[in-house]
């Protein structure tokens, strides 16, 4: 019934799937993506770099399921320090537009005490609607 979406570019997930697509309803649920590369190493450059990479990873899942940025209907952004997000909103906005253009889905920002991966500053999860 459900198709697991695990693009090779994101490495091998451990204990989760990067995305779960329900073809009958075309809903894609995207697991929280952090700012790591295909070797599952966090990218250097701090918050903005991790934010951009997390978005690229999220879109890798959407693309693997056949979607485009406009398919993304909801994002939840988890940050370990809201001040890091607020420090350079222009750079965060540029990083966002590089990946999703001017498509702005429903979004929430949540500050959390910590994330599972040591050193991760941001994690982004989402829901998309893609064509079956």
Image (tube, rainbow, N blue to C red):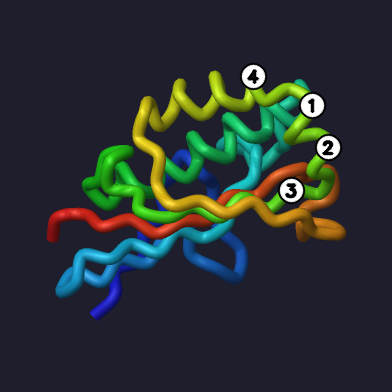
Looking at the image, do the residues carrying marks 3 and 2 touch, with CB atoms under 8 Å apart?
A: no
In the image, which disc is placed on residue 87?
1
Return the x and y of residue 48 as percentages of the image width and height. Answer: 69, 27
| Residue visible at 31% across and 42% down in the picture | 63
Return the x and y of residue 91 as percentages of the image width and height. Answer: 64, 19
Name the residue beneath numbered marker 2: 83
Compared across the picture, whether 45 is left or right of 125 comes to right
Disc 4 and disc 2: Cα gap in Å? 14 Å
Nearer the observer, 74 or 59: 74
Name the residue beneath numbered marker 4: 91
Nearer the observer, 10 or 44: 44
Looking at the image, do the residues carrying marks 2 and 1 touch, with CB atoms under 8 Å apart?
A: yes
Disc 3 and disc 2: Cα gap in Å? 9 Å
Is 5 rendered above or below residue 104?
Answer: below
Disc 3 and disc 1: Cα gap in Å? 13 Å
User: In the structure shown, which secondary structural element does the residue marked by tag 4 occupy?
Assistant: helix
Tell me how many marks there are: 4
Is 88 rendered above or below residue 55?
Answer: above
Return the x and y of residue 8 as percentages of the image width and height. Answer: 43, 45
Asked where in the image residue 52 lies, by quadrant, the reply is top right
Looking at the image, do the residues carrying marks 1 and 4 touch, with CB atoms under 8 Å apart?
A: no
Compared across the picture, whether 36 is left or right of 30 comes to right
Compared across the picture, whether 44 is left or right of 13 comes to right
Q: Earlier in the sequence, mark 3 or mark 1?
A: 3
Q: Earlier in the sequence, mark 4 or mark 2?
A: 2
Q: Earlier in the sequence, mark 3 or mark 4?
A: 3
Nearer the observer, 88 or 118: 88
């Amino acid at each position: 019934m459900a198709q697991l979406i695990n693009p090779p570019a994101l490495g091998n997930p451990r204990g989760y799937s990067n995305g779960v697509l329900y073809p009958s309803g075309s809903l894609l649920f995207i697991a929280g993506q952090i700012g790591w590369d295909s070797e599952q190493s966090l990218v250097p450059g701090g918050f903005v770099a991790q934010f951009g990479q997390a978005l690229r990873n999220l879109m890798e899942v959407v693309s693997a399921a056949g979607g485009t940025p406009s398919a993304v209907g909801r994002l939840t952004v988890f940050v370990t320090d809201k001040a890091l997000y607020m420090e350079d909103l222009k750079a965060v906005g540029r990083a966002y537009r590089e990946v999703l253009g001017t498509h702005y889905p429903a979004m929430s920002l949540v500050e959390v005490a910590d994330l599972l991966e040591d050193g991760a500053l941001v994690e982004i999860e989402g829901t998309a609607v893609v064509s079956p």
